[in-house]
Amino acid sequence: MRNLPLFAKISLVFSLVVTCFILLIGLGSYSVYRNSMESQVGEFVPQVLGQVSSRIDSYVDELLMIPQLIFNIPGERDALDILREASEPANSRALDYTLELHDVLKRLNFRTGENLQAITFYTLAGDAYLLSKVGGMWVKQDYRDQPWYEELDTVYYAPTIWGTYQDNSITGRPYVFSIVQPVRGLPKKQIDGVIQVSGSIEAISAMIHKVDFGAGSIVYVLDHRNHIVFSTNPAEIGQSWDRSYDVDWSDRPVGSESFELDVANKPYLFSYNWSTDSGWKVVSLIPSGNLSKGIYRIQFWVYAFVASGVLIVFGLAIATAYGFTKPLRTLSDRIKHLDFQHPDKSPSVDRLDEIGHLSNSFQNMIKRMNSLFSEITHEKVLKQEAEIKALQSQINPHFMHNALETIRMTYKSGRYENGEQGLVSLGHVLRYQAAQEQDFVPFSVELEFLDQYLSLQKLRYGDRMSVYMEVDPEVEEHSIPSMIVQPLVENALKYGVASFDHSISLTIRFGFDDGFITGDVVDEGKGMSPERLEQVIAEINDFSFAGSRKGGIGLANVYQRLQLLFGPSAALHIESHEEVGTIVSFRYPVLPHNKGKFKYANSNR
């Protein structure tokens, strides 16, 4: 915000103030209209569901009366007597009796039209007579094994509505909901059988399909146990509601209600009518877009009006503020195009007011800043060069002491030819050090120096020492800080002695990785514990150029030189495991080149 031009800030503030008034008027009007429409829709949908619920109650009452008719069927014999005789053992029933039972159930069933799927009479003998639209038959079914047995009303012998399920005993396996009616026995508190009326849900389906709330809508019919009797989604028929859509019926009032909820991050209107007579519920889930298409059209025009007003206000604000801030922008352009390389060149100031004085003062400040910046840069370069030379001078005495001591021990052991070879190698090393006046050398020169240094170390360690070197051909096209690898190799020789045979096995790798030169020095020595590794890394990071580091001059010297030469883009990394070995890696940036393949050369030193 504070980096915007002044005219933009003025325009923005003015536009925000006017926009707030436009938004308050437009969105306030839209909110009032929308709330009114949603309130009317919320009242209308439950009324429609109430009418459907009333028709379903009538249908359920009609089915509830069917098992009661069994006691009022006219005929030569009392229907109850025929039912009670069915409790005799199946092998003692005559064909005539089956025909009488079939006739009683048939007159009861098919006086009601298509609303029934079947009537089943369960006997005390453990079987049942099933009468469906395709005929009647005896089936091996015991009413005591049915899921509704525990809910039979054996006190008042009233019919009980059971949930919806898919009846496998009826042809076509239709979805039905059952009404079970116990037959009162002659002794009190005893039943002489159970009548099960399997009602069709097709009649309910016909009622629901007459109510169309648009695409994506779902309508449910729930019984008094909150089982789904019917749904426009057939896969849910017969299931329990079980807090679907996070709606718990124990928290909802009996009657009608509508409220909004989100389903899969989409708004829906949830409405229901809960019958006080049957306890059944008719529930609808309607996408809000189906009920408020007109509201959305109003919303579009309100948003279009607000957006147009904001654009007009913003355009007027920019035009006004642009004219007011033109002198300041002129000064800003002059300052922006000042020649920092030639600060003595005066800008063309054509006014003597406050802005002109401000321009002259700024030009004088630029001249002074350039002078101070040059002095500071020069001092920083001199200091950095002195620090690099000091770090290089730390290596030379340390290296000379170790090299001369190795040659002395070689002569002392009588290996005069090896001692002479060591003096020759030391001479090459000293000439390399004396000839280097620059911080960087070609990679081939540094590799030759490593060869001479490893030859000196071969005198000291003999056949115990083996070195394996890998060099990426692309690396040889670049330069490397002089003697940056020797301290790492010397450190690996010192601490890389294997515990089991006291041998020293080193691997030296140079590679090129996405614009960076990489190097690894790997030993197979005793390694370090995690605690010691953390201590060494802390000592390297907590460096000072006074030379008083607890960790010696090797690793800290390499780290400091990399930081001074390349800054934060260079890195030194140490990985170590006890009785496995240590890997010291470094990397520093170079200009990108094409990648090459590794070549492997075992030096066998």
Image: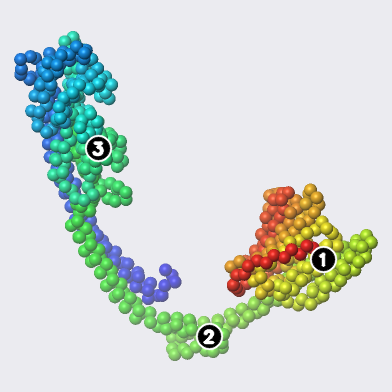
Residues at circles 1 and 2 in contact by the CB criterion of under 8 Å: no
Q: Which secondary structure lies at badge 3?
A: loop
Residue 539 visible in this rendered orientation of the protein: no
Decide which of tag 2 and tag 3 comes sooner along the chain: 3
- In the image, residue 498 lies at what x, y percent? 78, 52
> The N terminus appears in which quarter of the rendering?
bottom left
Reply above or below: 574 against 181: below
Under tag 1, what secondary structure? helix
Per the rendering, the mark at residue 304 is none
Q: Quadrant of residue 285?
A: top left
Q: Disc 3 marks which amino acid?
A: Ile
Real-space Cα distance between discs 1 and 2? 58 Å
Q: Which residue is mark 2?
A: 339
- Residue flagged by tag 1: what amino acid is it? Ser
Q: Earlier in the sequence, mark 1 or mark 2?
A: 2
Q: Residue at x 24, y 66 (%)?
A: 304
Residue type pointed to by label 2: Asp
Up the image or down, 166 lies above or below 309; here it is: above
Where does the image place residue 69, in percent across and percent down from the top left?
10, 22
**Residue identifier under label 1:** 455
Residue at x 69% of width, y 62% of height: 520
Point 59% across, 72% down: residue? 594
Q: Taking the image as drawn, is residue 20 in sight? A: yes
